[in-house]
Image (cartoon, coloured by chain):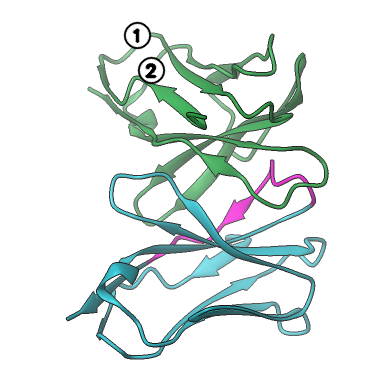
Amino acid sequence: NAGVTQTPKFQVLKTGQSMTLQCAQDMNHEYMSWYRQDPGMGLRLIHYSVGAGITDQGEVPNGYNVSRSTTEDFPLRLLSAAPSQTSVYFCASSLGQGSTEAFFGQGTRLTVV
Amino acid sequence: QKEVEQDPGPLSVPEGAIVSLNCTYSNSAFQYFMWYRQYSRKGPELLMYTYSSGNKEDGRFTAQVDKSSKYISLFIRDSQPSDSATYLCAIGGRGAQKLVFGQGTRLTINP
């Protein structure tokens, strides 16, 4: 099992560009989430999904879109990148309702210039 | 005010010392309290979790939750250089899909 795989690992964008951060898990987990990690802020929840076709907003959803068409994949779209979106992005998955553990990917380091 | 407050440190202690890491939280609705460990340039990994109040021990690590004071603690005994990492406390409900994290404490254990 690869676990949670995020691509790319690094990305530099210009202000106004759009891009998609990819996240895939091979553990047949029902729940998936996106977090951003900024210095002094910890991890903050952007969007999450409790199954294919079901998504909801977290604490900091503005400027990001998600969709979940399959159990395995949960891409995060930046619609028009802004310097404030410079951050490290982590995707996580958990088994489902009875789970107490989230498994994280290795992260995507995004810089918006 | 953040839902979970954690002193970001950094904290530096000699090898073999007892380390105490702490968080406070404000939302009483959460029942699961977790500690994640994050090595540099890696994703967080679950270290321990506790359900409701009480203590939980796993080897050199002990997690404590006091719901009456909304206080979460992690103790590391006989600390090792390999324990050097950022420790993040988190609270959540069943499912672990909506975790609320503290800021993280960067810990260094000096040989």
Amino acid at the residue labelled 1: Gln
Quadrant location, the C terminus of chain B: bottom left
Taking the magenta stretch, the answer to whether it contains residue B103 is yes
Packing grade of label 2 (10 A; few <14, some 14-19, many >=20) is many
Q: Colour of chain A?
A: green
Chain of the residue that carries numbered disc 2 in the rendered image: A
Residue at 51% from the left image edge and 30% from the top image edge: A4
Image vertical order of residue A101 relative to residue A97, above or below: below
The disc placed on residue A81 is: 2
Chain of the residue that carries numbered disc 1 in the rendered image: A
Where does label 1 land, which residue?
Answer: A17
The disc placed on residue A53 is: none
What secondary structure do most residues of the magenta stretch adopt?
A: loop
Identify the image quadrant of residue A34. Answer: top right
Identify the image quadrant of residue B87. Answer: bottom left
Pointers 2 and 1 in contact (CB under 8 A)? yes
Residue A57, horizontal then vertical, whole percent: 68, 30
Amino acid at the residue labelled 2: Ala
Residue B34, horizontal then vertical, whole percent: 62, 63
Measure how far apart labels 2 and 1 are at the Cα level: 5 Å
User: What residue span does the magenta drawing correspond to?
Assistant: B94-105
Q: Is residue B77 left or right of residue B28?
A: left
